[in-house]
Amino acid sequence: MTDTLTDSTIERTIDTRENEREIQILRIEPEDDLVVSAEDVEGLPLGLVKQYATVATRHATVREVDEGVWVATVTGLDGAYGDGVSQNDALASLVEAIVGWVAVKRRVGATDIPPMEGLDLNPPSHA
């Protein structure tokens, strides 16, 4: 299963059989504003989420996609990317993108946020 984040949707691709895929579109309605305040990101402290995002950028791939256009991504954080006129700009943009990505994943109840260097932002399991 993979999730791809766009502006206000998550496209979830599930491999159901060897050559079949099921795609679910999860939409966030405009009135369902994500909670990203000075202190909170969908129930998590903003500082923790920014720490996660900063740690995640240590695992980023940064590449120049056109002259003077850099894009940064992290494997496993499908749909979260940063861009800029330099590698550093792309990485800075990626931090903010990851904060938003985590907010969306938390809002839709996703439990597949990849842990990064011991930081796990998934909701606790109630087994």
Image (tube, helix red, strand yellow):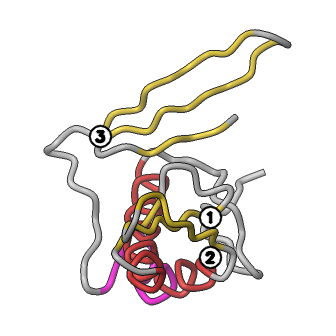
The picture places residue 21, in percent across and down from the top left corner, at 67, 15
**Amino acid type of the residue tagged 2 in the rendering:** Ala
Q: Residue at x 57, y 70 (%)?
A: 62
Front residue (pair 84, 67): 67
Which of labels 1 and 3 is toward the front? Answer: 1
Tag 3: Cα neighbours inside 10 Å, few (<14), some, or many (≥20)?
A: some
Image: magenta residue range:
39-49
Q: Reading the chain from its start, which is encountered first: label 1 or label 2?
A: 2
95 on left or right of 14: left
The count of marks equals 3
Residue receiving disc 3: 28
Q: Residue at x 50, y 66 (%)?
A: 64
**Amino acid type of the residue tagged 1 in the rendering:** Val
Residue receiving disc 2: 56
Q: Are marks 1 and 2 in contact (CB under 8 Å)?
A: yes
Corner quadrant of residue 92? bottom left
68 is higher (above) or lower (below) than 127? below
Q: Identify the image quadrant of the N terminus.
A: top right
**Residue sticking out furthest to the left:** 31
Q: What separation in Å lies between label 1 and label 2 (alpha carbons)?
A: 7 Å
49 on left or right of 77: left
Q: What separation in Å lies between label 2 and label 3 (alpha carbons)?
A: 24 Å
Residue receiving disc 1: 74
